[in-house]
């Protein structure tokens, strides 16, 4: 999958942010132990994992972070979305296209009865 890695210099040091090109609100990169590992598209129902996440997020009217907290607690993992806020004291220094093989979330983690 082609993604964009953007490097920023901030007061706290250099930060790298992975972004989805032309991202839609239904698309997410999920981090496991602070590394990009999984890709979720809530409207791509051809993938069972995405269908289950669609049910857990959209149908149950939960946020992605609420669902990830439940998955973390039930399965003893450390999943998160990357929400890096960049202040006005940051400067974009580099941007490049990278290729990452992100997996779908494991179906065994996505029990409908979360």
Image: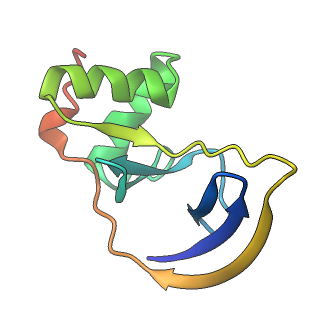
Residue 87 pos. (x, y %): 80, 46
Left or right: where 26 falls relative to 44: right
* Residue at the (19%, 26%) spot, across then down: 111
Given residues 45 and 67, the one toward you in this image is 67
**Quadrant position of the N terminus in the picture:** bottom left
Q: Residue at x 18, y 46 (%)?
A: 106
Q: Nearer the viewer, residue 114 or 13?
A: 13
Task: Please provide percent x and percent y for residue 7.
Answer: 64, 71
Residue 40 at least partly seen: yes
Whether 90 is drawn above or below 31: the answer is below
Residue 19 visible here: no
Quarter-wise, where is residue 71 in the image? Answer: top left
Residue 72, position as x, y percentages in the image: 25, 28
Of 34 and 26, nearer the camera is 34
Up-down: is 21 above or below 35? below
**Left or right of residue 57: residue 86:** right
Viewer-proximal residue, 76 or 22? Answer: 76
Question: Residue at point 29% right, 55% down?
Answer: 104
């Amino acid at each position: 999958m082609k993604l964009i890695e953007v490097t920023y210099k901030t007061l706290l040091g250099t930060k790298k942010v992975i972004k989805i090109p032309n991202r839609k609100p239904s698309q997410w990169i999920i981090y496991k132990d602070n590394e990009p590992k999984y890709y979720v598209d809530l409207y791509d129902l051809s993938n069972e994992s995405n269908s289950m996440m669609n049910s857990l997020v959209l149908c149950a009217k939960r946020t992605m972070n609420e669902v990830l907290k439940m998955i973390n607690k039930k399965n003893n993992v450390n999943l998160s979305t990357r929400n890096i806020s960049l202040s006005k004291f940051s400067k974009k220094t580099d941007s490049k296209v990278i290729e990452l093989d992100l997996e779908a979330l494991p179906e065994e983690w996505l029990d409908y009865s979360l």
